Amino acid sequence: MEKNYPDAQAPPSYNTTQPGYPNLNQQQPLIVAQPQFIQAPPNVLGNVPSMATCPSCGARKQTKIEFEPSTKTHLIALLICLIGGICCCCIPYCTDSCQSAKHTCSSCGAYVGTFKN
Ligand SMILES: [Zn+2]
């Protein structure tokens, strides 16, 4: 049985401490320049096209909005239906202020957020 001993080469030892010279730079902290991330202002969405940062492509642009009925729209419709009759219950679906404004990115079309009235 023959054993293979690795030809271990010990690194040469350097004597870093010089006699007579105090090692002043021993504990100097290493300053690493951290990249400064400028935090984008939060997306303030209204029921009109708003400036927002797209979570998908990162573009800060005016959003596109489309109104879609929310739970509140259905509730108002139900309420109007109970009070005023079935003929009037479609009113909240035609009124933008009764619906949620869905904001999408004007560049890539990604969903940005919803403004709930
Ligand atoms: Zn986008």
Image: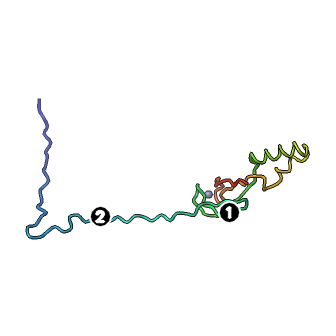
Tell me which corner region of the image, top left, top right, bottom left or bottom right, holds residue 25. Answer: bottom left
State how the image is colored: rainbow
- Figure disc tally: 2
Cα separation, mark 2 vs mark 1, equals 44 Å
Q: Quadrant of the C terminus?
A: bottom right
Q: Residue furthest left?
A: 19
From the Cβ of disc 2, is ligand 1 less than 8 Å away? no
Secondary structure type for disc 2: loop
Give the number of the disc on residue 50: 1
User: Up-down: is 110 above or below 3?
Assistant: below
At 12% across and 64% down in the image, what residue appears? 17
Q: Type of residue at label 1?
A: Ser
Q: Type of residue at label 2?
A: Leu
Q: Which residue is mark 2?
A: 30
At 67% across and 59% down in the image, what residue appears? 45
Question: Which numbered disc flags the more N-terminal residue, 2 or 1?
Answer: 2
At 64% across and 56% down in the image, what residue appears? 108
Q: Give whichever of 29, 17 is nearer the camera.
A: 29
